[in-house]
Image: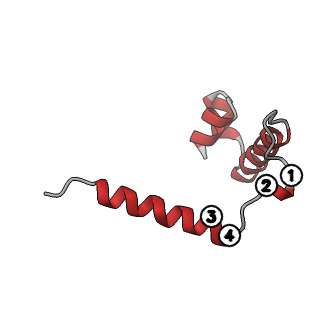
Amino acid sequence: MFNIATGWLGWPPSEAWDTPVVEIVMAWDSKRQFLIDTNPFGGGGDKDKLDRKAVAKEARMGFRVAAMSRKKD
């Protein structure tokens, strides 16, 4: 949570340490939604959302590529 608060949200470390986890998550979700809604290239509507199967398929492909590109000892 510290990484999200200081990195994504840009909060100073003292504020990140004193903020409850729930508030950090809520602030991060709001910032993420703001970035989606204000993206000038689209992507903010429901029509652009990928369904769970498509996301899972993309993740599996990424993991396969990563596993195949690892150095073998």
Q: Any mark on residue 48, and which?
A: 2
Q: CA distance from mark 1 to mark 2?
A: 6 Å
Residues at discs 4 and 3 in contact (Cβ within 8 Å): yes
Report the amino acid beneath label 4: Arg
Taking 2 as reference, is 53 above or below it?
below
| Disc 4 target residue | 52
Q: Position of residue 26 (x, y in %)?
A: 78, 49
What residue appears at the point 81 percent right and 41 percent down from the top-left corner? 42
The C terminus lies in quadrant: bottom left
| Disc 1 target residue | 45
| Disc 3 target residue | 55
What residue appears at the point 39 percent right and 58 percent down from the top-left corner? 65
Residues at discs 1 and 4 in contact (Cβ within 8 Å): no
Q: Dot 2, how many residues are within 10 Å of its Cα: few (below 14), some (14-19), or many (20+)?
A: few
Label 2 secondary element:
helix
Residues at discs 2 and 4 in contact (Cβ within 8 Å): no
